[in-house]
């Protein structure tokens, strides 16, 4: 097995709000990957005294432990339990009902000798490569399908769309959101490679149109995960003054994480 993990903050003087981990059980039978993209909070109050990195570290640590130690636990249940555990850690000090309480996008994958399970919640991506080289992106595209007119202000998004029917969902403080994730199970023999990307790394495809998802996976395999992140940084820098993708980016630079696993 070959695994590779790269995670880099969007700005050197800002904390990285992403979380990434690959877990390999001591038995050597299978493994799991966890990727979270923490949602950058607004400048206004969030009802929570904790930072987004605190939240993603707590949630990501719980997911790593649960997906490895309880291999028969469905991924939706693992996410539900991890959210509940994280919420309990600050329920006494923070207003968890606030729409901008710390939250994150989620990608989970777990493999055994028999199967590969996956879960995607919100706008991070999981790429699944079959033995014949076919690459299938697993995406939760609810946010991407919303009209730009509905995303005019943070207040409008929070009131009408964030973790609401007809909008989009993230892992925050409600365990029931796990049931909203995109999930599936594939035969183990039908999967050769997995790659999980936060949207900061997926910009190579989704914003800058440098290639399709198969091209993206090929770049990571041949040149490494760092090469993908470096190329995104080059494109962001060249486009910082406004250009082909500038108007479609919420920020010039974003945290970028790539986890690659050849099974």
Image: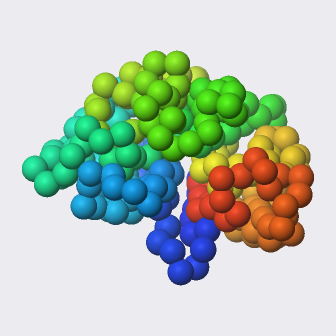
Q: Quadrant of residue 6?
A: bottom right
Q: Quadrant of residue 148?
A: top right
Residue at 56% over, 42% down: 153
Q: Residue 213 location in percent, x, y? A: 79, 41
Residue at 60% over, 74% down: 11
Count of number-bearing discs = 0
Q: Is residue 108 left or right of residue 263?
A: left
Residue 92 visible to an observer of this rendering: yes
Figure coloring: rainbow
The quadrant in which the C terminus is found is top right
Q: Residue 151 location in percent, x, y? A: 61, 36
Q: Residue 154 location in percent, x, y? A: 51, 44
- Between residue 168 and residue 89, name the one nearer to us: 168
Query: Outermost residue, bottom direction?
Result: 13
- Between residue 96 and residue 7, name the one nearer to us: 96
- Between residue 236 and residue 84, name the one nearer to us: 236
Q: Is residue 72 left or right of residue 1?
A: left
241, above or below 184, in the image: below
Residue at 24% over, 43% down: 96
- Between residue 256 and residue 28, name the one nearer to us: 256
Residue 67 visible to an observer of this rendering: no
Residue at 44% over, 55% down: 41
Q: Residue 126 location in percent, x, y? A: 62, 39
Q: Quadrant of residue 48?
A: bottom left
Query: Outermost residue, left direction?
Result: 92
163, above or below 60, in the image: above
């Amino acid at each position: 097995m070959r695994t590779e993990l790269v995670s880099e903050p969007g700005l050197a003087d800002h904390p990285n709000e992403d979380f990434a981990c690959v877990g390999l059980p001591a038995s050597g039978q299978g493994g799991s990957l966890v990727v979270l993209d923490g949602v950058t909070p607004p400048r206004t109050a969030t009802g929570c005294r904790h930072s987004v990195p605190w939240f993603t570290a707590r949630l990501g640590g719980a997911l790593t432990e649960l997906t490895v130690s309880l291999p028969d636990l469905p991924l939706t249940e693992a996410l539900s339990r991890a959210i509940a555990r994280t919420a309990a850690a600050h329920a006494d000090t923070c207003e968890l009902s606030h729409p901008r309480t710390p939250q994150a996008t989620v990608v989970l994958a777990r493999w055994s000798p028999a199967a590969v399970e996956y879960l995607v919640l919100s706008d991070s991506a999981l790429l699944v490569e079959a033995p014949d080289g076919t690459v299938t992106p697993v995406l939760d595209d609810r946010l991407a399908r919303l009209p730009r007119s509905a995303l005019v202000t943070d207040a409008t998004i929070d009131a009408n769309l964030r973790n609401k029917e007809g909008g989009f969902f993230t892992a925050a403080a409600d365990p029931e959101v796990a049931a909203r994730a995109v999930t599936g199970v594939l035969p183990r023999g039908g999967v050769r490679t997995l790659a999980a990307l936060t949207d900061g790394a997926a910009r190579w495809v989704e914003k800058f149109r440098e290639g399709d998802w198969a091209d993206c996976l090929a770049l990571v395999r041949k040149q490494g995960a760092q090469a993908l992140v470096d190329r995104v940084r080059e494109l962001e820098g060249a486009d910082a003054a406004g250009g082909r993708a500038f108007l479609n980016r919420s920020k010039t630079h974003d945290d970028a994480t790539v986890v690659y696993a050849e099974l």
